[in-house]
Image (spheres, coloured by chain):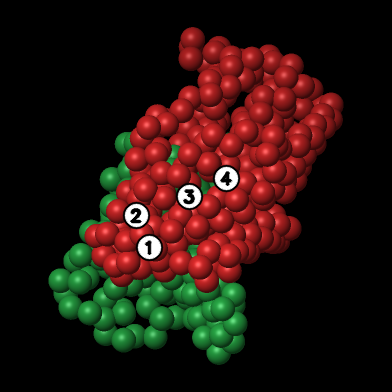
Chain colours: A red, B green
Amino acid sequence: MTQQTTCTATAYDFDDVLDTILDIACRLLEAGAEVRRVEDTVERLCFAYGAHDVDVFSIVVLVGVTSEGPNGDHYTQIRKVGSIGNSLVRIEKLNALSRRLCACPEDPWKVKAEVASICKKQTYSELLLHVSAAIAAGGFAMFFGGGWLDGLIAALIGVVIMVFNIHTPSKVNGTLKTFVTAFVAGVLALLACAVIPSGHPDMIMIGTIMLMIPGLALGTSLRDLFGGDMVSGLLRFAQALFTAAIIAAGYGLAWLTIGGIV
Amino acid sequence: MTWLDIINSTIACSVALLGIAVIFDVPPKKLLWAMIGSVISCVLMLIGDKFGIDPLITNMVATAVPCVYCEIMARVLKTPTTVFMIPTLLPLVPGSRLYYTMFYLFSGQQALFMENMLAAVKICTGIAMAIIVVTGAVRWLEAAKKQRLEHERQKHQAEINR
């Protein structure tokens, strides 16, 4: 009986409810979730909170929803999404939260605080991120045919890439950051091979490129496209291709400038 | 490529993917399951290479099998499929083809540039086709299940009304 009283949905102000639901949707998009998942989550949550009808539209940077609340009024809210990163653990936690809410709706203000705390938490420490960048770059350099030496150099450059990734001020333009990082990684690989002649610059660069390739964006864009969300899929696909082109330009510039000298 | 090379490459790839998984923020408890998926795709790709199978076919199989694994694990562990899918598909990204495409573009070797670019496109097409097939099949199964549940609910309701 107590279970039933805590699970009543209609007691909450639907404006607050919608605000909280859009909070979850925004955080999902920011973490790099597919649009279909976001739309599905919003729809399910609205119905769980007692809505009679829900219309939700989302593209990569925007979520809009109009819903007929439990009292028959129509509510509309639109939210723009800031930066898009990649954090699979946030997608997982927000998904678990929304599953829980669908089973038993809770006070929207409490949920809002919980969403904020989920998004504040860092799963892996900065040190661990640097180490994993090193082993990722080194491992890929060896996977694509490099030797131990290539792996080691790639690992060191991987750390540099991660330093750029984490410590660049957020005001710096993302494209510029990618370009500079790629250029520096290319220059370092070529210089290292000039000092140590038995290294293979191509293997080292391939290893470090794998760190920068927009894998999550590309994967999500394919899933969006084949799920029927053409706009979002194409947007994200274009974004990924553009990033790839910028990376190529960075490495290419390194070859053109340093490659002839060393 | 000998079997020993395949084992070596698989180990290198697993180590690299552990790093990538941490960078992509895969939940710590699910790291192992995501790693298993990527090892499956890595091994399938290397075996395809060893026997000289067309890269389109190799990449389709090396995508489809781990994709099915991801969908199953996602349902077993009640986790979004993306969590497993991204680390799993990363070994298939044609990193070296993309690199050489860029390299030959800048060094002005047209023929090699085209060759590498087309090879990269072919690999990506293979991956995309496999994702279409698996995702399509899963959506269809989901829709069928939903319909069945709805049907049962209506039958149940009708019985109560009676």
Spatial CA distance of label 4 from label 3 is 8 Å
Same chain letter for marks 4 and 3:
no
Q: As shown in the figure, which amino acid type bears the numbered disc 1?
A: Cys
Which residue in the protein does label 3 denote? B82
Which residue in the protein does label 1 denote? A193
* In this rendering, the label closer to the viewer, 3 or 1: 1
Residue A48, picture quadrant = top right
Q: Nearer the viewer, residue A250 or B39?
A: A250
Tell me which residue sits at (51%, 29%) in the image: A97
Chain of the residue on which disc 1 is drawn: A
Kindly check if marks 4 and 3 are in contact, taking CB atoms under 8 A apart as contact: yes
- The answer to whether residue A116 of the structure is visible from this angle is yes
Q: Is residue B158 above or below residue A21?
A: below
Residue sitting at the far top: A2
Tell me which residue sits at (55%, 89%) in the image: B111
Kindly check if marks 2 and 1 are in contact, taking CB atoms under 8 A apart as contact: yes
- Place of residue A223 in the rendered image (x, y in percent of width and height, measured from the top left): 56, 58
Same chain letter for marks 4 and 1:
yes
Spatial CA distance of label 2 from label 3 is 31 Å
Please rate how many residues cluster around mark 3, counting C-alpha atoms within 10 Å: few if below 14, some from 14 to 19, many from 20: many
Please rate how many residues cluster around mark 2, counting C-alpha atoms within 10 Å: few if below 14, some from 14 to 19, many from 20: many
* The label number, if any, that marks residue A153 in the structure image: 2
Image-based side of B109 in relation to A26, left or right:
left
Kindly check if marks 4 and 2 are in contact, taking CB atoms under 8 A apart as contact: no
Tell me which residue sits at (74%, 16%) in the image: A13
Spatial CA distance of label 4 from label 2 is 34 Å
* First along the sequence among labels 2 and 1: 2
Spatial CA distance of label 3 from label 1 is 38 Å
Spatial CA distance of label 2 from label 1 is 9 Å
Q: As shown in the figure, which amino acid type bears the numbered disc 4?
A: Ala
* In this rendering, the label closer to the viewer, 4 or 1: 1
